[in-house]
Amino acid sequence: MHSVALGIAIAATMFAATAVAQTRLVTEQMMVKSPDPGIEIYVRNKRPADMTTFRPERTVLYVHGATYPASTAFDLQLDGMSWMDYIAARGYDVYLLDLRGYGKSTRPKEMSEETRQSCVATLR
């Protein structure tokens, strides 16, 4: 009896993994204007192609830390799948965004000025 239950559990897991792997995803990318002039925030969205209902409890927002843009942290393909793909394939509406000055978002001029000033001070 135990081996039958184990066999059913393994078969169900394999079927679920195959169904997830076959889920067609839609990807959209956009630049969203910020209230600050000249600054736009990069946003990427992935979701199942057949998703028609969007619920807060099935929505995920990835925001990166201070070193790498969101796309390399959450949408980097490893063995054919990223974290974004993995979550979206399970029925979630998944977003990532690059904070201002990172990745594809606009870099404020203050960020460049601080770097220049810091380099000049270091060379003195």
Image (cartoon, rainbow, N blue to C red):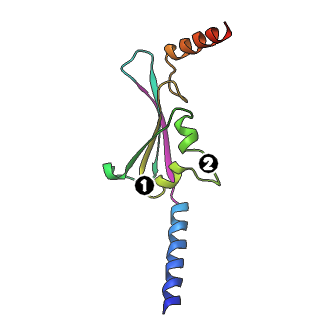
Report the front residue among 45 and 52.
Answer: 45
Q: Is residue 50 above or below residue 4?
A: above
Quick check: can you spot residue 88?
A: yes
Camera-near label (2 vs 1) is 2
- In this view, the residue in front, 24 or 85, is 85
Residue 106 place in picture, x, y as percent? 50, 22
| Helix, strand or loop: magenta stretch | strand
Whether residue 122 is in magenta: the answer is: no
Q: Residue at x 53, y 66 (%)?
A: 17
Q: Which residue is mark 2?
A: 77
Residue furthest top as drawn? 124
Q: Is residue 76 above or below residue 48?
A: above
The residue indicated by pointer 1 is: 50
Identify residue type, mark 2: Gln
Residue 47 position, x and y percent, is: 45, 49
Where disc 2 sits, the SS reads: loop
Magenta span covers which residues?
23-33
Residue 83, above or below 95: below
Q: How many marks?
A: 2
Q: Quadrant of residue 90?
A: bottom left
Image quadrant in which the C terminus is located? top right
Quarter assignment of residue 68:
top right
